[in-house]
Image (cartoon, grey):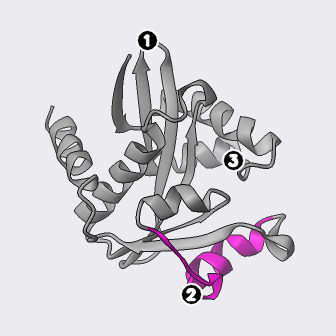
Amino acid sequence: MDIRYRPARLADVPAIAALINGYAERKLMLPRTTSELYEHVRDFIVADADPGGLCGCVALHIDTDRIAEIKALAVAEPLQGRGIGRRLVHEAIAEAERLGIERVFCLTYQEAFFAKLGFTRVDRSRLPDKVWSECVRCHRFLDCDEVAMWRPVHQADAACAPAAAAMLDSSQS
């Protein structure tokens, strides 16, 4: 199976919504409306399998000139454990680096996964822009059990180098 990583297109939104909301129904991530996904489609990077179609997604949402959130990471269950989620995160980090972002963060239930990628746990109070712009509107705001984690974009992480090179190659085609 060949998997290509690329920026999302409008035509990908229904598949992104199905993937994310399938996990949201099981309380494994937050739901996203179709209108929200269309509004933020430029934030998304997708994994596109041949054959099979869209099998993963991640969004890089810029909060300030220094920090961005990695969010809405999802990989189709049959393809989990093959490095697709890790590669999607690395693609998002490469995009953050291209934009000049200093640090990326996430709110997650998958602490061990992100720890393997160099993220460390941080108190949510260190992310006031996120908390007061988006979290405050969430139905789980007063009962949030997600873990906040972050990492610098420029971190000694050899696994990110191939993703950055691949992103540059795909953008030049």
Are dots 1 and 3 in contact, CB under 8 Å? no
Q: Is residue 168 left or right of residue 64?
A: left
What's the CA distance linking mark 1 and mark 3? 26 Å
Residue 55 horizontal/vertical position (percent): 51, 28
Residue 161 horizontal/vertical position (percent): 21, 53
* Residue 51, label in figure: 1
Q: Nearer the viewer, residue 25 or 86?
A: 86
Whether residue 147 is visible here, answered yes or no, is: yes
Q: What SS does tag 3 mark?
A: loop
| Type of the residue with mark 2 | Arg
Say if 65 sits above or below 69 in the image: below
Q: Which residue is mark 2?
A: 126
Q: Which residue is mark 3?
A: 32
Comes first in the chain, label 1 or label 3: 3
Q: Quadrant of the C terminus?
A: top left
Residue 99 horizontal/vertical position (percent): 27, 64
**Residue 26 falls in which quadrant of the image?**
top right
Q: What SS does tag 2 mark?
A: helix
Comes first in the chain, label 2 or label 3: 3
User: Around disc 3, counting alpha carbons within 10 Å, would you say few (fewer than 14), some (14 to 19), or many (20 or more)?
Assistant: some
Q: Quadrant of the N terminus?
A: top left
Residue 137 horizontal/vertical position (percent): 76, 69
| Type of the residue with mark 3 | Arg
Comes first in the chain, label 1 or label 2: 1
Say if 9 sits above or below 127 in the image: above
Q: Nearer the viewer, residue 161 or 142?
A: 161
| Type of the residue with mark 1 | Pro
Q: Nearer the viewer, mark 1 or mark 3?
A: 1
Look at the image and give the residue range highlighted in magenta: 119-138
